[in-house]
Amino acid sequence: MTGQLMTTLGGLGLFLLGMGVMTDGLKALAGESLHAWLTRFTHSPSSGALTGTVATAVLQSSSATTVTTVGFVAAGLLSFPQALGIIFGANLGTTVTGWMVALFGFKLKIGAAALPVVFAGAMVRTFGRGRWQEAGKAVAGFGVIFLGMDFMQSGMSAFQGTVTPDQFPPDTLTGRIILVGVGALITLVTQSSSAGVAISMTALSVGAINFPQAAAMIIGMDVGTTITAVMASIGSSQAARRTGLSHTLYNVFTAIGALLILSPYVWMLERTW
């Protein structure tokens, strides 16, 4: 059992490493064009929301988008209303990771497929020049993400039947609030809501938790991810602090709303999907 736990933790480490490598590569590829793009296409909160969604989906990091936005507000390059739109959009764009895991992570033999991707990316990173090096870095990171998913799934499969939903807080309002706190704590520790989502979905896939429990944890992870923007805004301008606070309040209120509709949402899914 200890060996399987180490496999799970090692898989989480690979996932976090892959996310970091891929994000760094994508940010380097974007370069100054990301800055120009954010300021050029953010004319209103609605256009900012679209910009934030696309930027986060491309970078695979809502933290990168929100921290950049707070920095732009502090520098006077973006107004407070424009920044709000980008941050709201970033919350939508970050769901792409969850869809990647759901669509590819559990339906394909990702371990065998990920290794050639890592090799190809590493070769491009080693022998490429200029932007090709960053592209190879991003590709290798993408492969490492799914390699980590494979290890996590393999490690957690040992807990199937041993760790069950009954061992987690019950599916009551109090139980869900506790799981929201657990989800927020996971994000604070890993500094990645994407990693938390991957952990929850992997546990769900092996039957360690049920869908309402996984959903409550993911709601908490959305709250926990606000810490990055808050830290970035500390000691900055008033507009930047307002941006960080607004990001936190938005995620807290959406978490409350999500908790309120969770029961009817689960009921609807059980009968339609």
Image (cartoon, grey):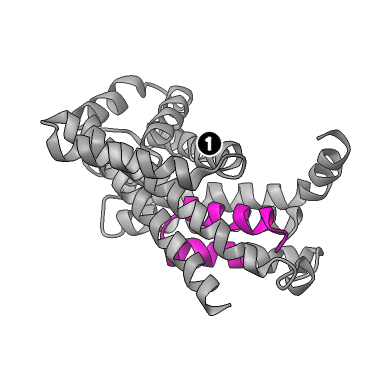
- Where does the image place residue 8, in percent across and percent down from the top left? 51, 65
Q: Which residue is mark 1?
A: 92
Tell which residue pokes out farthest to the bottom in this image: 2
- What span is colored magenta in the figure? 181-208
Front residue of 113/15: it is: 113
Residue at 38% of width from left, 32% of height from top? 58
In the image, residue 261 above or below residue 10: above
Residue at 63% of width from left, 68% of height from top? 158
Q: Is residue 265 visible?
A: yes
Tell me the SS state at disc 1: helix
Q: Main secondary structure of the magenta part?
A: helix
Front residue of 125/86: it is: 125
In the image, residue 171 above or below residue 147: below
* Crowding at mark 1 (Cα within 10 Å: few <14, some 14-19, many 20+): some
Residue 189: within the magenta?
Answer: yes
User: In the image, what residue type sits under mark 1?
Assistant: Leu
Residue 187 appears left or right of 37: right
Looking at the rendered image, the quarter that the N terminus falls into is: bottom right
Residue at 44% of width from left, 67% of height from top? 189
- Where does the image place residue 11, in percent across and percent down from the top left? 45, 60
